[in-house]
Amino acid sequence: MSFVRLGVNVDHVASIRNLRGGTHPDPIKAAQLAIEAGADVITMHLREDRRHISEDDIKRARSLPVPLNMEMAPTEEMNDLACMIRPYACCLVPERRAELTTEGGLDVVGRLAVLQPMIDRLQGVGIRVAVFVDPELHQIESAVSLGVPAVELHTGAYAGGNDGELDRLRAAAGRAHDLGVEVHAGHGLNFANVGSIAAIPQLRELNIGHFLVGEAMFIGLADAVRRMRSLIEAARRSLSVL
Ligand code: PXP
């Protein structure tokens, strides 16, 4: 059964740093620890209000030994920055100023005309683009029509305890795979709920942040990442014996 990459999102290391306005704790140091413990990708969300990750963090993260996945809103400002910084990948996410975190997937269906030139520009400079969508077939089909190589499925509703959501995520992953794009997933994942998502056969990448940074307070970041990795691997092994 194919390998699932673990993307570790270090945004909330920067959230803690920014509470005091200094340089500690450094999200790049956290990223290095996460990589040593098994992270395959480092993910950072550069928000329009810069509430956690800064442009300087993104620039420094490019020298890390694994791919950098920059999450960002589809705005002209972010597009300009991404084209300048050139992370390995960009994941386009919706953003509202007052939200505590990303609240839903991108409405690709309603925004095709705005998204297409942005995606073309990002891909034109060699950035691999994914769009973050709710597990809805029409959103996935629209995302695929934009020519992106990957979609990231929003697992927030599943993580919030919505029972029907796992079936929707499975169906969405199957459809995305059949249409030829890579399937990623993330939001709200933790040790207790990651297994069912990691066991979706078409999955290729998970992006996990808030829980890992929180758990780091109790068991350390390296152990939290190692344990997450081993839960993902156990879920994949369970698939191969079916
Ligand atoms: N994937 C995307 C596209 C996100 O916006 C986020 C939150 O920044 C995550 C994954 C990670 O979510 P969490 O911090 O809840 O693990």
Image (cartoon, rainbow, N blue to C red):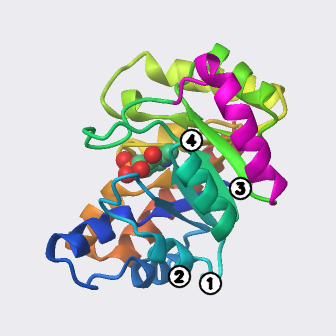
Q: Is residue 155 visible?
A: yes
Q: Which residues are magenta?
A: 106-125
Nearer to us of marks 3 and 2 is 2
Would residue 126 be found to the left or right of residue 193 on screen? right
On the image, the x and y values in percent for residue 144 come to 77, 28
Q: Give the mark nearer the N terminus: 4 vs 3.
A: 3
Q: Which residue is mark 4?
A: 74
Q: Give the mark nearer the N terminus: 4 vs 1.
A: 1
Residue 144 got which mark? none
Residue 60 got which mark? 2
Nearer to us of marks 3 and 1 is 1
- The image quarter containing residue 65 is bottom right
**Most foreground residue, 221 or 55:** 55
Q: Quadrant of the C terminus?
A: top right
Instruction: Please tell me whether the stretch drawn in magenta is mainly helix, strand or loop.
Output: helix
Q: Which residue is mark 3?
A: 3
Q: Are marks 4 and 2 in contact (CB under 8 Å)?
A: no
Q: CA distance from mark 4 to mark 2?
A: 22 Å
Q: Give the mark nearer the N terminus: 3 vs 2.
A: 3
Nearer to us of marks 4 and 2 is 4
Q: Which residue is mark 1?
A: 63
* Figure check: 136 above or below 44: above
Would residue 186 be found to the left or right of residue 200 on screen? left
